[in-house]
Image (cartoon, rainbow, N blue to C red):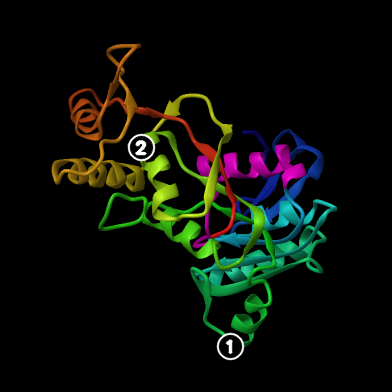
Amino acid sequence: MQSDANAHPDRITLTTAVTGDMGEIHLLQPPGAFALTPASRIAIQTVGERHHLLSGNGLDWGSGIGCLAIIAARIEAVKRVIGLEISALNVTVAQQNAIHNGVADKVEFFLSDSYTPFAEEDRKSLETLRGQTNFILANPPSSEGDDGFAFRRLVLRGAQSYLVTGGVVFLSISYQYGAQRVARLRQEAPGFSYGGVLASSDWVPFDLQRPDLLHCLELYAEEERHGGLAYVFPNLEDAHGYVDAQTALAHFHRTGLSPLTRWQTHLFRYMGE
């Protein structure tokens, strides 16, 4: 994922190498607002590359500073996008970014806890998309106090109330969560078919110099110790093998080397109840 050199530390430009036919995206990113991660960059790339799958009305779950909603709004066939975001600062910045990128007439951002906006007017507006939504974009963070996957379950379960039959979800799920968790999503949120991986990074470090990712790996290891599904990382000492989170964490503490992962976006299609 490439971006132009920033002219200002609080701004970032995403070039057509990232957004495809959607053109350059210019984003304000002030201190304290959501900062683009490798996962969010793959999500942006997915919308640019797979824009033919998106049309009509859409939701951006956990919209951050608005990048996914904005690039989706650039698609001619898309009529309206609502971003749902729990940070008031992010909502303010996202609204500014929509204006700067010329899509304010197609995009709104609501201060919201998942699918529940805080303001009554916003709740009423979102209600008009119940059963009328053609797509949902979601790049959730890792959840706390569980296996890190809870927000992805929440996205799909909530999506059932909004999507039309045949509507799609672009859902960020990085490789280390493992195929078993992805397969279980269809049981945990019935009514969806799985369309596979839409876009993926190469193998890249799950950078444990980042405190947030180190914390995630520690939680993954704890989940395994309590009998949860194993996580999946390539074995750095055996090119043909894989290891779980506990082994990856122990290897990091022993060698200082971060494990590898792939940042990915997966497709789910709503087939109805």
| Type of the residue with mark 2 | Gln
| Residue positioned 49% across, 62% down in the render | 32
Q: Nearer the viewer, residue 88 or 42?
A: 42
**Residue farthest to the front?**
273
The residue beneath circle 1 is: 120
Q: Is residue 262 left or right of residue 177?
A: right
Q: Classify mark 1: helix, strand or loop.
A: helix
Dot 2 or dot 1: first in sequence order is 1
Q: Is residue 174 left or right of residue 128?
A: left
Quadrant in the picture for residue 261? top left
Residue numbers of the magenta segment = 31-53
Residue 268 lies, in percent from the top left, at: 56, 46
The residue beneath circle 2 is: 180
| Residue positioned 78% across, 67% down in the render | 104
Q: Does the magenta run of residues contain 94?
A: no
Residue 119 lies, in percent from the top left, at: 57, 85
